[in-house]
Amino acid sequence: MKIGIVCYPTFGGSGVVATELGKALADNGHQYTLSPITNLPDWISSRKTFFYHEVSVSKYPLFDYPPYELALASRMVDVVRFEKLDILHVHYAIPHASAAFMAKQILQTYGIYIPVVTTLHGTDITLVGKDRTYKPVVTFSINMSDGVTAVSENLRKDTFEFFEIENDIRVIPNFIDLHRFNLQAKDHFKRAIAPEGEKILIHTSNFRKVKRTEDVVRIFAKILEKIPSKLLMVGDGGERSDCEQLCRDRA
């Protein structure tokens, strides 16, 4: 199949999951095309069955905010028409599912039917989607999707609780490629980080307020009072500098 995957290119779980899913599909003989909003994700590696389509957003003095959704919908139409895609798989309801619906309607005027599968991720529903500003659009986009998945049972439950959803939502949990990430008898990194045998704690996330990364540092400070430990915080984002300063203040 020719599969179009739409995701955010930033350091977030949804973009990584979407990209890794595309790689796995490519390894199984499918061809996939990736359309992030702006730029190529840092974690992409070249593959013969992978094609990247950037979404260019024009800037006009008339607009206070660039019309991302319209540019994205137009790009979807273009890619589906000329790459002959079989299906669109969009990650995040806002703005990808709503843009996909618009693209789907436009494509019908060309006599093209493209099914759309929407995958819901955490912040997509629990924070952004609950905002009254976006709720009608989120509800409509989910209900108009040909298929809907969520990354956890809890997210599926919250979606039905917060929105008037008539569509079925299937749970497909986030995954790890155990061929790439597996336990090996190598401890050189551990010895470099904790040369005195300290316990190692790891927090992995994008550094945003909702991830409560500063709380991680404060909690670790209490652990350190009783247990010799090292903390690794893996990720990046707007809260990184605050976390770094907090660590310095407590050093």
Image (cartoon, rainbow, N blue to C red):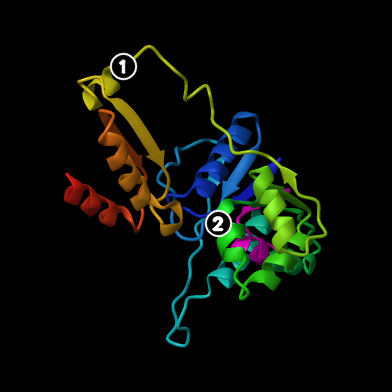
Q: Earlier along the polypeptide chain: callout 1 or callout 2? A: 2
SS for tag 1?
Answer: loop
Comparing 232 with 34, the one in front is 232
Outermost residue to the top: 185
- Residue 85 in view in this figure: no
SS for tag 2?
Answer: helix
Residue 83, image x, y percentages: 65, 51
| Circle 1: residue type | Asp
Q: Is residue 108 left or right of residue 191?
A: right
Image quadrant assignment for residue 64: bottom left
Disc 1 residue crowd, few under 14, some 14–19, many 20+, Cα 10 Å: few
Q: Is residue 63 above or below residue 77?
A: below
Residue 203, image x, y percentages: 39, 39
Residue 187's label in the rendered image is 1
Residue 197 drawn in magenta: no
Q: Residue at image x 76%, y 49%?
A: 169
Part of the protein shown in magenta: 84-100
- Whole-angstrom CA distance, mark 1 to mark 2, is 35 Å
Comparing 99 with 224, the one in front is 224
The residue at which mark 2 appears reads as 123
Comparing 65 with 72, the one in front is 65
Residue 23's label in the rendered image is none
Residue 86 drawn in magenta: yes
